[in-house]
Amino acid sequence: MGNISTNPPSGMRDFSGKELAARRYIEKIIREVYELYGFIEIETPAIENLSTLLGKYGEEGDQLIFRILHRREKLSRALEGKPSEADLADIGLRYDLTVPLARFVANNKDLPKFFRRYQIQSVWRADRPGKGRFREFCQCDIDITGTESLTAEAEVCGAVSGVLKRVGLEDFYFHVNHRQLLKRMIAYSGISDSLEETALVALDKLDKIGTDGVVKELRERNISDESTKKLIELTSSVAEDNHAELERLRKIFAADEIALKCISELADILAFTSTSESGKRLKIDCSLARGLGYYTGPIFEIRVHDLKGSLGGGGRYDNLIGMFKGSRIPAVGFSIGFERLILLAEERKLLPDLMPGADILLCRFPDVEISKALEVADHFRNNGIKAEVYPDATKLGKQLSYATEIKASYAGIIGADELKDNKITIKRLSDGEQLTLPLCDAPGKVKAGK
């Protein structure tokens, strides 16, 4: 037994009470802001059919899905021959919350025409763990389905901006591109349709491996040096501001109706958000790719100047729900990188002093029965005070030391004489102030002094 590792699997984590308090604090902000924007919370299962998941995320995404093996006899039968992956599993852990949402919308007939949902749940990816990158992590999604109006893009950006502002961030920006425009850039660079997806996958790694890394990967994916150079120049050149950048693109694609329509949509998003907080933070970025295969229109990522990678992202996916429903339902979504947001808030000391656990530890002298201490604890709890009872009848000094150890705000000292008079002595641990007062007044004193 001594050789069994006590560490969780690689890329998975335990959370202490203090860590969970920070997570719940950020979650609370996200819920409150999302609900202010009219989003309704849903939940979906951790496990989905592989037929639901596969074929939606692109070349690399599908490879990162955790598959769950068949059980018992079914697995034994599959192993009798030379099984493929498809023979061994037909379910897997969800890779994100967007594909499950698409299935949910297709499966529910009574949803509003313009369904606004938010969802805060864990997802799993068989990825290489790193700082802020885990195999199990929480996603916080908002989506609007049923409309092609770019108002939806403005709304999801506004909600996400509201969350980040309330957390205390100021230096975040929304990098914006258009998936169809990016495809026109790839074609303009001389890359064939058959290599379009592989070029997108490589370009999506720009923030992780840099320009040189992307150039190397494009070459490894059989894209010519000439096309690679043209694509890098086209996507990395940036004008002095958004409107100048759009004008640059209009000149390049003056004869391309599809590209011009995409550029017009980006201009509309800028116009729709021009008076909002999020609008001040939009940056047209032609290098932005977003690797997931289901995006069809405007795409977004949140960037912070001292954070490698993004703090979240999303975009328009007008065809995904139709894969399940059989009819086209447009949609836009945005996901906050919850784990990275937590790390950033901790590093920048944006979290309040969160104290999980008891407000008061009730200590007792040996002449006080435990039932009386529990009765006093219930009195505090009934008045909204978190109370814990020291379980053993031991020296008072030891009990008070434990109150300090668990970072309780107060220690409540119960003696037989105090109980007889329906009183209690409370000690504020921050400065040692101690007083005896009627038990009925004690909860108010603790609440006022926390």
Image: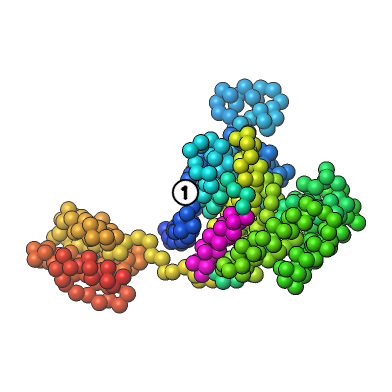
Asked whether the viewer can see residue 303, the reply is no
Q: Position of residue 12 (x, y in %)?
A: 55, 50
Q: Residue at x 47, y 68 (%)?
A: 351
The magenta segment: 150-168
Q: Amino acid at mark 1?
A: Glu
Query: Could you say whether the residue bearing mark 1 is in a helix, strand or loop?
Result: strand
Dot 1 alpha-carbon crowd within 10 angstroms: few under 14, some 14 to 19, many 20 or more: some
Per the picture, the main secondary structure of the magenta-coloured stretch is: helix
Asked whether the viewer can see residue 62, the reply is yes
Q: Residue at x 83, y 45 (%)?
A: 193
357 and 220: which one is in front? 220
Q: Residue at x 78, y 54 (%)?
A: 259
402 and 208: which one is in front? 208
Q: Residue at x 28, y 72 (%)?
A: 449
Quarter the C terminus occupies: bottom left
Q: Is residue 11 above or below residue 286?
A: above
Residue 108 is left or right of residue 449, and the answer is right
Q: Is residue 21 above or below residue 143?
A: below
Residue 379 is left or right of residue 104, and the answer is left
Residue tagged by mark 1?
Answer: 41
Quarter of the image for residue 244 reads: bottom right
90 and 283: which one is in front? 283
Quarter of the image for residue 251 reads: bottom right
Q: How many discs mark residues in the rendered view? A: 1
438 and 32: which one is in front? 32
Q: Position of residue 5 (x, y in %)?
A: 53, 48
Q: Position of residue 67 (x, y in %)?
A: 61, 37
Q: Position of residue 23 (x, y in %)?
A: 47, 58
Verify whether residue 251 appears in magenta: no
Q: How is the image coloured?
A: rainbow
Quarter of the image for residue 209 reads: bottom right
